[in-house]
Amino acid sequence: MARIDRIVLRSRNPRAQIEFYCNVLGMVEFADQSVGYPGEGARLSFVPAETDHVPSADDLYWKIALAVPDLDLACCQLAEKGTPVGKPEQFGDIGYLAHLKDPAGFTIELIAHRFQGEASPAPVDKERFGGGAVLNLLTLRCASEELIAEKCEGWGLKRLAIMPVERYGFTLHFYAFTDEEPPSADPRAIENRSWVYQRPYTVFEVQHRPSLTHTRLPAAGAAGYVETVFEGAEETVWEDVFGVRMEKV
């Protein structure tokens, strides 16, 4: 089965990025200079940029999310290292989360396995970041709900959940390369949400925002999102709508 293998981002100082993700967020550096957590989750690769990263609400790329058994522990660990992080909050019926920026200005979301006040079913290893983090979500943006379904299903991804966020005018769609079935067959069911955040692999999340007129990829050499690589495809294909490269193995 195919998998989300790596997310490639362009930044002024790739080495500073690597050191931050390893020293602060507990990832490990691999032989190809990508970073990630051991296991099934995607890795991050950083390549040099000629400019600083200036994020915009119409960027194709939004964020990654690290899912953790203990969000409060993760925020305490960041504070001990002098890394600023937002106050954890229960964001509606979406999840218990917090946000921070990496040295290049890319957004990182921290999301707990369960809603605020609910214990994670996973063991908490206090020696690891957040008790044992996984690169859980890659979040991109799109203006067309139909295009999201068409592309994701065409690539062989399974829909896991749909989460409307009405007060901000967008809906979140979650897909993954998996044979697993969510707790409920209704993708909008609340019980599917925490289940998504407990997956050991990286889930493809797309923010559907009807008010979005276009999505933007950075110019050649500029800092920002480069591509996401899906490994295990039947053939090597580049899909420019979401900046996805399907790699045949």
Image (cartoon, helix red, strand yellow):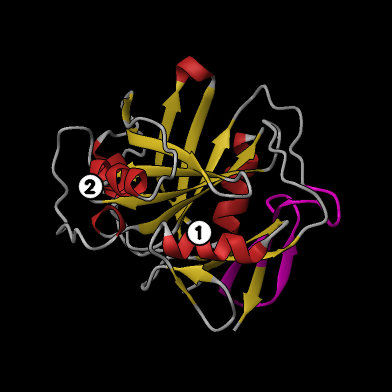
Q: Is residue 51 left or right of residue 154?
A: right
Q: Which of marks 2 and 1 precedes in the sequence? A: 1
| Residue 185 in view, yes or no | no
| Residue at image point 65% right, 64% down | 14
Q: Is residue 221 magenta?
A: yes
Which mark is drawn over residue 200? none
Which residue is situated farthest in the right direction here? 220
Q: Which residues are magenta?
A: 218-245
64 and 247: which one is in front?
A: 64
Q: Dot 2, crowdedness within 10 Å: few (<14), some or many (≥20)?
A: many
Q: Which residue is tagged 1?
A: 20
| Residue 181 point in image, percent of width and height | 29, 55
| Residue at image point 37% right, 73% down | 38
> As shown in the figure, which amino acid type bears the numbered disc 1?
Phe
| Residue 222 point in image, percent of width and height | 81, 51
| Residue at image point 30% right, 49% down | 77
| Residue at image point 68% right, 66% down | 245
Q: Which residue is tagged 2?
A: 70
Q: Quadrant of the C terminus?
A: bottom right
Element carrying mark 1: helix
Could you tell me how far apart the alpha carbons at marks 1 and 2 are, in whole angstroms?
A: 20 Å
| Residue 37 in view, yes or no | yes
